[in-house]
Amino acid sequence: MLLPVHTLCQTNSPRQNNDQKESKTDTIFSSYIKIAANPQLKGNGIKRILVGKNYRNEWVEPVKTPLLGLNTAYGGLVPKKLGGGKETRTLRVEDSTGRQWAFRSVEKFPENVIPPELKKTFAEKLIRDGISASYPYGVMSMGVLSNAVDVPYFKNTLVYIPDGPALKEFRPKFNNILVLMEEKEPSGIAKQKDDKKEKLLSTNELIYELTNDNRNTVDQLSVLRARLLDNFVMDFDRHEDQWEWLGVDSAGRKIYYALPNDRDQVFYSNHGILSKWVSSKTILPETQGFRKKAKDIRTFNKAAQNFDRFFLTGLSENEWSTQIDEFLNAMTDSVIESAMDKQPKEIQKYSAEKIASTLKQKRRYFKEDMMRYYRFLSNTVSIVGTNEREQFSIAKKENEVSVVVNRIDSAGNISSKLYERTFDPGITKEIRIYGLEGNDKFVMQGEESKIKIRLISGPGDDEFTNTGDGRKVLAYDAAFEKNIFSGDQNFRKRISDDPQINNYTRLGYRYNHGSVGISLEYSTDGGLFIGPKFKMVKQGFRKEPYSSSHLFAVDRAINSSSYAIKYNADFIKAFGNTDLLFRSDATLPTSRTL
């Protein structure tokens, strides 16, 4: 589960040689059809005002598309499995040799995301109309951009699937449909030396492999390059299910490389009155829309908040800076123009030139945005071990903290290095180290640090050794385990009979947030009061649903000059397991009777 050490984090990933020509498609299309992605998205005046002009022209413009016959294409394709995300329908097909493709519908079907109470209402119409904010053929440009910056990708071809019995039981949902035919063998990754086909893993499958064998690791530079590309095209929907992983054998261990998938939200637009309101910080800030500079790069990446905090924990500030520079050097005008030229010719007259111009302008602001995001991720860092044995070594100095993780072999000897990173207290305020299972060792040395360090050892008989200043270090473990504490005992112990003290929650990150709204109050004496209210919520370690919450409101009476002032504050687990709640209300001016 840990980051490979720098010797494994090289930019020479197992990518195809640039001189190696990609194989041409072995299907010859003889019939074509002109068809629009979704003619229903033309939209009337009110929809354009509320939801935006967006990419309506691209959705309703018919494009010339080849017809794909399942019985004849690639020697015959057999439907295997129906899938898809919240709005996209996907059909997995296979030829006689086992080669696979995925048919991904261009049209979106939002039935699964519309609450039952909104069905057959104007709200449902607006939700369906909101699909116009997505660029229907955006993924067709991603191959060129991905190849330029060393990010693996899945090649795709726009085709039309006519109705027919070859669709079998999938016929009701996949007849007469415009799809992107996606090859399931990734481009940009060299084949194994023995030409063995490696199974692509989902993110959950990958985490199982990482957790149960500490020889397995992830090339986090490959993850960073992919995430830089996500942010460049402002593809906001990059949660854990949008990735696949390819394992490559290397010196007795397996290194996994990130393969981004399901790129439905590249160049996402957001121009309507309602759409802009929905993209506010307190609702869906990740939908702020494609632009030359992000409104807030932190909240834009909300969908990937847990993904990035798991797969980007080991890279230094210098590595981020270097990768961003290389990314921008590769993202030339010709690359951007070539990428947009992959769009269907019929729609290029609408937004292609504007998108290309925005990408070119974006290069001026991109490094500033991404380094800000690096600092955001680095404020609190979780380092996660495995269910095997590791030693976590923490060396503290006034101006830095170094964390090194080594494998412990079956004989109990310190073995290969799994992780190494040095933290700057000017950026990082807290480090959380999770040992998970196994009899792990935690070795601390050095002077007091400005960085708070939490050691959550996990199930197993763990050993804590301290030869330095343990202030700002907290160790968590279960009382019923045979734990060993040696050396200076000047760090704080959190030992509990509750086994949940060892819990690790990978998907547990939540944003601090603030909001401004309108407060309404009514009293029999003063009548109706109205005014602004301000709310601030801060998250904390193992505090549910938040660490602290503050609400401040100043309301003025409609029919008088009276004011109602309110301040509420909650502090969760302020004293041990005891919460502190504060409530205050005042009405001004007050009247006194003599």
Image: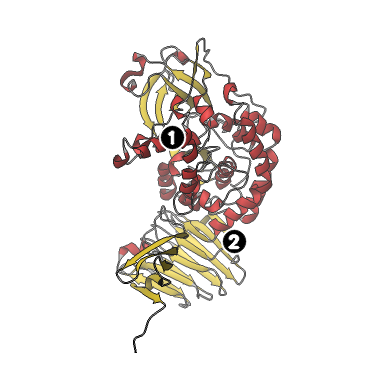
Q: Circles 2 and 1: CB distance less than 8 Å?
A: no
Circle number at residue 270: none
Residue 135, percent from left and from top? 52, 33
Q: Residue furthest front?
A: 559
Name the kind of residue labelled 1 in the image: Asp
Dot 2 or dot 1, earlier in sequence: 1
Residue 198, percent from left and from top? 47, 33
Mark 2 or 1: in front is 1
Q: Quadrant for residue 537, please give it.
A: bottom left
Q: CA distance from mark 2 to mark 1?
A: 48 Å
Residue 334, percent from left and from top? 70, 32
Reply above or below: 135 against 3.
above
Residue visible at 46% across and 28% down? 106
Residue visible at 69% across and 46% down? 364
Of residues 43 and 200, the one nearer the viewer is 43
Mark 1, secondary structure of its residue = helix
Name the kind of residue labelled 2 in the image: Thr
Q: Residue furthest bottom?
A: 594
Circle number at residue 129: 1
Count of numbered labels shown in the rendering: 2
Residue 213, percent from left and from top? 43, 48
Location of mark 2 (residue): 422
Task: For label 2, count other residues whose C-alpha is less than 10 Å away and answer few (under 14), some (14-19) or many (20+).
Answer: some
Reply above or below: 191 against 212.
above
Q: Quadrant for residue 464, please give it.
A: bottom left
Mark 2, secondary structure of its residue = strand
Quadrant including the C terminus: bottom left
